Image (cartoon, coloured by chain):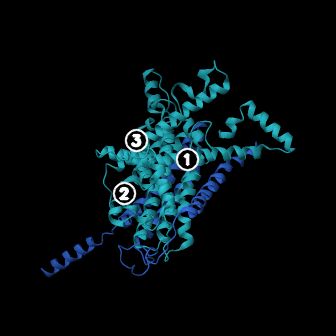
Amino acid sequence: MNEGLISFLSQFDGHKAFVKMISDFAGTDATSTISFFIYLAACLAVVGVMATIGGLGTYAERKISADLQARQGPNRVGPFGLLQMLADGVKMILKEDIIPSAADKPMFIMAPMLCIVGVFGSLAVVPFSSGFILSDLNVGVFYLLGISSLVGVGIFIGGYSSNSKWSMLGGMRGASQIISYEIPVTLSIIAIVVLSGGMSFGTLIGGQGGFPHEWYILHNPFTFIAFFVYFIGALAETNRAPFDLPEAESELVSGYHTEYTGMRFAFFALAEYIEVFVVCGVAAALFFGGWKVPFDLGTGEAFSALPPIIAKNIGQILQLGSFFTKTLLLYYVVIWIRWTLPRLRVDQLMTLCWKYLTPIALFNLIMIAVWAYAFDGKSMFELFTAMGSGSTGGH
Amino acid sequence: MSSHNLDVYMPILILIGIGIALVFGAILFGKLIRPHNPSRLKEQAYECGEDPVGVAWSNFNVRFYVVSLIFIIFDVESALMFPVASVFKKFNEIGRGGIILCTFIVFVMILVSGVIYCWRKGDLDWVKSFHLNLDESSEKNTQEAS
């Protein structure tokens, strides 16, 4: 079930005609070449949008924190301070690039790159809409877990290579925190995979509907808990407060990026903000129905009076709206939590992960498997309606 | 269709390429416009304004090592659980849900026993509580003394 970008485009006659024209012109089968250029354009577009969202994330963070603390926030550069991120970017690129003489230079240069590659790689499977997902791999969510671990490696190498005690402590804490919280996150994702019967995002979202009662978060009581386990784990994996121990300002100066200046530091920050978007997007896809729009408006069949190419694209735009609304609401919650809760201590962090979240996630996993077996994968709502109509379904 | 199967991996390579190019490009572009006045003090590692004492690559708390060991066990196990989880629904639909449920529970139980073992051994505590034994032995000593 690969409903990626190319298969969405290839249902239109224009794409087929174009591929045929180029193939005839070149004398060989140009399908892959054309796919490459389409993917290249789409990837550049996604990276551009994501970099903007990352930049706006820093702006939103400062504005929301100002709001929560009854301050003004950035309001000088551009209307409402919206151009603050451009000003920050210009400032960052004008800063001197300092590499400590005692540092491990190749690794020092490689660390921000690993963070960026890990985050950009995970963008390939983020399901923006049913047509606009760069590649709907059949191992989608598994691939995402794998490639986003590169961020943890980048953080650790950044801390290690700086040869500064603050960085070393931050890198160590970051590595242990990220790998620890990966366990509850993975277990919660497996629980959803059990319900949907596949790892690709097309399958995961295909099992849900447009209305809240068709989402996996309200599928049964255990998926409701699984969402919170996932969300707490995701906060910790992206080093967001209250789990920002790797860069705890009051104790570690700035943690793993103490020695980084200018653009190298900017890439760490950019990677963090995009990663928050990615984990929120995955939460929206797994638990909140992803790009599904109520009344199946997303397929474009409701607009059948219009020509199919316009109807389909209206459907896609509605799906994009649905996905981005859910994701950005979760993004707001992440920022809200950061400015509300105090930071944890290292031992509390480990206790929360290993003694609370992991056993809860394991229990959830068994209960969701039992639920899927006992009720044939029916949701609570379906069971209630079945009871209401008097028919005794299931076992 | 078989020729298209590898095409779906194309965006991943492109995105990784864009990531590497972006980092290199931004740093090389910045080289044209940013100042470059290195000095010995700037290139020192930050240690609150003092000269750094020794290197940071020293022996480290062994707790981090134990955490990573526990992680590896759990991560491999959960990676093996993904295939079982993704065929769960299909087995259920063809009426062999009992077998897959048992398989799944066996898989999860291995993890549960791992958690219980680590918990009993005290490896899930950040600071291993050996002062408990000290208290008991000191109590014994006082009892013996009395």
* Residue, disc 3: A80
Query: Residue lying farthest right?
Result: A27
Q: Which chain is cyan?
A: A
- Tag 2 residue: A355
Residue at figure coordinates x 55%, y 44% from the top left = A49
Corner quadrant of residue A300: top right
What residue sits 45% from the left and 55% below the top? A237
What residue do we see at 36% from left, 56% from top? A352
Seen in the picture, residue A81 relative to B68 is either above or below; the reply is above
Q: Looking at numbered disc 3 in the image, what kind of residue is underneath it? A: Phe
Label 3: few (<14), some (14–19) or many (≥20) C-alpha neighbours in 10 Å: few
* Rendering coords of residue A273 (x, y %): 47, 51
Residue A69 drawn at (x, y percent): 29, 46
Q: Which mark is residue B85?
A: 1
What chain does mark 2 sit on? A
User: What whole-number distance in Å separates the C-alpha atoms at marks 2 and 1?
Assistant: 24 Å
- Report the side of A109 relative to A334 (left or right): right
